Amino acid sequence: MPVTRTKLFAGQRLRELRKRDNLTQQTLASLLGISLSYLNQLERNHRPLPDRLLHLICEQYALTPAWFNDTREAHRLQALRETMGDPVFKDVSLTMTHMAEAARQAPALCDAFLTLYRAYMFEQQRAASSLPDTAPLEPYEEVGNWVQEKQNYFHELDCAAENFYQNLPENKDNLEPVLAAFLQEQHGLHIVQDTEMEQEGLVWRINRQRSTIMLPYNQTQESRIFYLAQIIGQLNYDKLITRILKRSAPKNKNSFQLARVYLGNYFAGALLLPYENFLKTAQTMRYDVERIRRHFGVSFEQVSHRLSTLQRPGMEGIPFYFLKLDIAGNILKSFSANRFSQARFGGPCPLWNIFRAFATPGQVQVQLSETTDNTIYLNVARTVSHEGRNYTDRPRQSAIVLGCHIQDATQTVYADGLDLSDHSLVIPIGPGCRACSRDNCSHRSLPLSGRLLDTGSDTRGVVPYRAYPA
């Protein structure tokens, strides 16, 4: 069975491209060899962008098709689905087609509606529990939404980190002494290992009075290198980070500062894995995370996270989603450069291979899965937990999953041996039971939110109650 592609409605992206080059609709239509009315229909999402025009535009503007992906629309649609599942909307008849059309045709209106709903939910919770006045979104949610809006790619910071790496001394096989020497020469800071920091829950501390950088004793080398890169980002690129934040970051004070921390981490990852070199290596090694991490001397998680950021215009890698969670199902990190969207409420789907990874620590689990929007992904999952330091230590057990669309799967080593045309063994997964529309799933723990419950009939479902069909 051949892989089918969904229709690509790219009106917003076409407008962005045209306005970026200060072109009128007539000028762009002439450049593409199409009529003004046809371009107008494309920009209004009245017609999908055909492959012929997609490839022509990519050649004209040195872009790749990934630049036109509809990740924002997919994530907006997922948020609408969850929101419309609230019982307050039980009398509103909206199908998935209606919501998809709204997300495509009126994205700003949908965003305003979602913001209003979050504010409503906050007021409901505050009234019920006498909470003090705070922002409707937690800072980590605001920052997560902001990072997602940027597709987890920050061009200026990425290029700055790449330039810093290129200007380092030639011996880059072991970055730790190189970065330590830079901090000593440029800032007068030398490295000291502290045996007490682990008990304090700290990973690094700058003691300016003693001109030292204190690192925990017995940390792994890849962790030490990452921490030194974080510190360089904070000391040398604070002004650049501030400019990026002032331009588009959330304005709430806590969210703004949390976004600063995120950009510091982003800089560190981009320094250790400079974009062009990393992308070429990843493509040559067919995205084999274990081979790539050994090549660069970093961790499995660092490589996986970096793979989810490769969205430089004209030089994109595979658009991956990246997610990290603990053994209880708590989401620790979540970024997506493709359509994949995780529900905000409730736990993740238990059929996902990230949970199987906990049963096979250190081993890679590969899975083909289909989400409720009929998109098939290749998922690569593995535990990334650290070993305990002593008998009484209880290290966090966590795992990550990296996923790409099935149409990109053949570029990776993980598709070897899989019959991508046979969908009979594809695992149906959902965004969490609260937002999942798969009524016949034997793993369901809750009915789909917003449905009326059927508790008085002679039938029973997997849970002790069934929900009436929508």
Image (tube, rainbow, N blue to C red):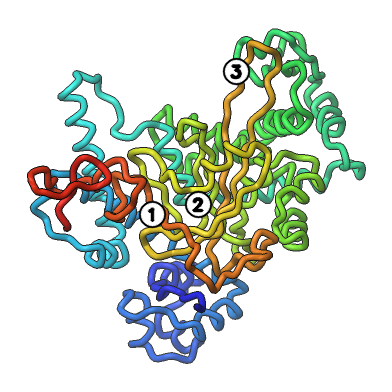
Using the numbered discs, state the Cα–Cα distance from disc 2 to disc 1 in whole angstroms: 9 Å
- Whether tag 2 and tag 1 are in contact, CB under 8 A, the answer is yes
How many neighbours does mark 2 have within 10 angstroms: few (below 14), some (14-19), or many (20 or more)?
many
Quadrant hosting residue 379:
bottom right
- Dot 1 lies on which element? helix
The residue to which callout 3 is attached is: 394
Identify which amino acid the numbered label 3 is placed on. Arg
Q: Which residue is drawn at 21% across and 48% down?
A: 85
Instruction: Pinpoint residue 288: horizontal percent, then vertical percent.
Output: 72, 54
Of the two numbered discs 2 and 1 on the same chain, state the one appearing first in sequence: 1
Foreground pick, 385 / 255: 385
Identify which amino acid the numbered label 2 is placed on. Ser
Foreground pick, 213 / 447: 447
Q: Residue at x 47, y 89 (%)?
A: 30
Identify which amino acid the numbered label 1 is placed on. His
Q: Using residue 252 as the reference point, say whether residue 290 is left or right of it.
A: right
The residue to which callout 2 is attached is: 336
Q: Residue furthest front?
A: 458
